[in-house]
Amino acid sequence: MLIKTPPSTALIASLETVEFGRLLDRDPNELQKLLGLCVKDGFFYLSLEDPRISQLLSNKNRVVRIMEEFFALPTEEKMKEDRGSHTHGYKPAGSFSGFKEGAKDGYETLKVSYEEMISKSPLLPSRVKEQIDLFDRFIGSCHLVNKTLLACLSDVLGLHPGSRFEDHHRDDRPSNTTLVLLHYPKQDFEAGMGHNKHTDIGSITLLFTEQWGLQLQAPQAGVTEWSYVPPRDGHAIINVGDSLRFLSEKKFNSCLHRVIPVANDEDRYSIAYFLRPENKVQYRDTDGKEVSAQKWHDEKYVMFGESHEKQAMSAMLTGGMERRTVEVASS
Ligand SMILES: O=C(O)CCC(=O)C(=O)O
Ligand SMILES: [Fe+2]
């Protein structure tokens, strides 16, 4: 596939890289680097070239082929998988606000939750059931990567049992952890579609994308310009979400990000694995209010659907990071 690039005048983000293999070995320098990047911007590349995890990338390529087939189905077929849920099944394009004032979003998704995969639920999307071993292995590896990152962060911070990050993400407790397959059909982005600016709801997002379009604002740069994140073979993009930021008592940062596909004659595909805390976990949100992970998740999804005007009145969509950019810029 010919990968379209942004215009030569566009800003390009230069993100650092953490090597997953070194984290598995608990290399002290790599652990410090991981911590530093979570504290700084909470957005970086993760190299997955270690043989112990190489299966993840080959399975990812197989999942991309399946999602291309799924999203090419007629709308009525896809709507059979719509469960009116933000954690399970299909979401058509246009249900949220897009990146441009007054316009809707331009992406559809298929979601496969960790819980339903583990229990091999009959409610799983039929395409997933047809390839259950592949999805089981793929979700298992994504889960392992994100849990490893959590364990490394707990180690390097010297957190004690009971208050380690993994203690808020036990595998046998209900959570909104889910795999999301995203498709941005060819769109006239001048009309404003894409994916509106936000920080992620959960703890750690593992993102795979072979195409340009993802943009971010680095929180400490004191600027509000958007820069494109280059896709990089053999790597995933990691981003710290609101929940881990709150659980770290805001020691960690998140980056505000959005998606504007760069070519209006090309479909864009991406895959995100959202590790989220147990639903009952409590933390203090952007405004210092005590809230459960479940409530933060549900309310933030409601906010994704609100008008831009309403979104601008709250720090929820931006996880407080936009406000922070303004503070830094004016201090
Ligand atoms: O499609 C992408 O590259 C990113 C999607 C994203 O930011 C999200 O779903 O939270
Ligand atoms: Fe996101």
Image (cartoon, rainbow, N blue to C red):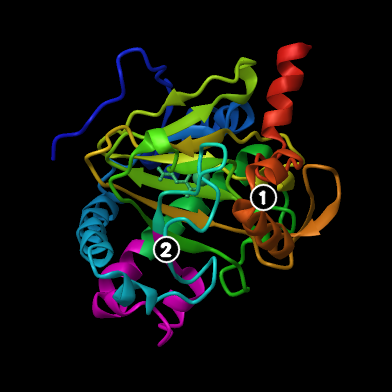
- Residue 158 seen in the current view: no
Q: Which mark is residue 140?
A: none
Query: Who's the residue at 52% across and 67% down the image?
Result: 87
Which residue is drawn at the image coordinates 50% and 55% (left, top)?
A: 274
Q: Which residues make up the magenta segment?
A: 109-138
- Quadrant in the picture for residue 112: bottom left
> Does the stretch in magenta take in 126?
yes
Q: Is 118 situated above or below 152?
A: below
User: Residue 158, image x and y in percent?
Assistant: 69, 41
Query: What is the secondary structure assignment of the residue under circle 2?
Result: loop
Which of 267/255 is in front? 267
Residue at x-position 28% and y-position 46%:
186
In the drawing, does residue 314 fall left or right of residue 94? right
Q: Quadrant of the C terminus?
A: top right
Q: Name the residue carrying label 2.
A: 92
Residue at 47% of width from left, 69% of height from top? 113
Q: Say which element carries label 1.
A: helix
Q: Position of residue 247 (x, y in %)?
A: 72, 48
How far from the left and from the top, in percent, is residue 96? 54, 54
Amino acid carrying label 1: it is: Ser
Which quadrant would residue 6 be assigned to in this image? top left
In-image side of 130 versus 286 (left or right): left
* Disc 2 residue lies near ligand 1 with CB under 8 A: no
CA gap, disc 2 to disc 1? 26 Å
| In-image side of 166 versus 71 (left or right) | right
Find out whether residue 326 is within the magenta segment: no
- Mark 2 vs mark 1, foreground winner is 2
| Residue 196 in the image, given as x and y percentages of width and height | 53, 42
Residue 138 in sight in this render: yes
| Tag 1 residue | 243
The local crowd at label 1, few if under 14, some if 14 to 19, many if 20 or more residues have their Cα within 10 Å, is many
